Amino acid sequence: MSTKYRFTLNGQPAEVAGPPMARLLDVLRRDLGLTGSKEGCGEGECGACTVLLNHEAVCSCLVPLFQVEGASITTIEGISAGDEVSELQRVFATEGGAQCGACTPGMIVTIRALLDRHPTPTRAQVREYVSGTLCRCTGYERIFRAIEVLTDQRLAEGVASPSAKGVSGE
Ligand code: FES
Ligand code: FES
């Protein structure tokens, strides 16, 4: 059975037809050509497939297509502003936080959700958010460093967060 679903995808109206239980990850990659979201475990354990669903970070391998009706979806392709990389992507690049193509897209999307809630997060908040996004090789220190640099920049610019101590302030 194939049903039409309408939703907002990276800020634009989108429509796709498919089985209600089709995995959002497959629909994004196969039907919509958005291959930035990766498949790792396929079981909700690794975070490689993370997208924002109504501003919440979710594993798209666990989201059935019917759940996106009327929703807002943001993928890694929608994190940048047009051709410009976002400030988050920039510090990931300059501080070595972008490590491999498997985990980085999910990591960036997850941290986008964090920064939307906590513009200048503590390291404890960063740890909590990235705990569901696994890195199996180079580790998290450069990722923490990238967010610390961004946080320091934001604090210098006067961006306030109620609990802000900088990411090194656990
Ligand atoms: S592929 Fe979705 S959580 Fe691993
Ligand atoms: S850097 Fe991607 S899995 Fe470790």
Image (spheres, rainbow, N blue to C red):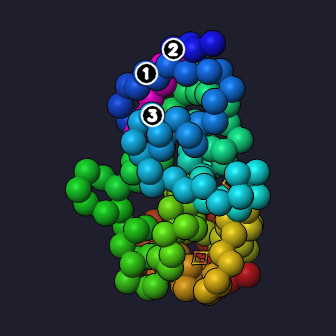
Q: Which of marks 3 and 1 precedes in the sequence?
A: 1
Disc 1 secondary structure class = strand
* Amino acid at the residue labelled 1: Glu
Q: Residues within 10 Å of mark 2 (few under 14, many from 20)?
A: few
- Alpha-carbon distance for marks 3 and 2? 13 Å
Q: Are marks 3 and 2 in contact (CB under 8 Å)?
A: no
Q: Main secondary structure of the magenta part?
A: strand
Q: Which residue is mark 2?
A: 4
Q: Is residue 158 visible?
A: no
Disc 2 secondary structure class = strand
Q: Is residue 103 left or right of residue 158?
A: right
| Front position in the image: 72 or 76 | 76
The disc placed on residue 15 is 1
Residue 75, how many percent across, how many down?
47, 47
* Amino acid at the residue labelled 2: Lys
Magenta stretch in the rendered image: 5-10
Residue 33, how many percent across, how many down?
39, 42
Q: Which of marks 2 and 3 precedes in the sequence?
A: 2
* Amino acid at the residue labelled 3: Asp
The disc placed on residue 31 is 3
**Residue 10, placed above or below residue 80:** above
Q: Are marks 2 and 1 in contact (CB under 8 Å)?
A: yes
Indicate yes or no whether the magenta region holds residue 158.
no
Q: Residues within 10 Å of mark 3 (few under 14, many from 20)?
A: some
- Alpha-carbon distance for marks 1 and 3? 11 Å
**Residue at left 69%, top 69%?**
134
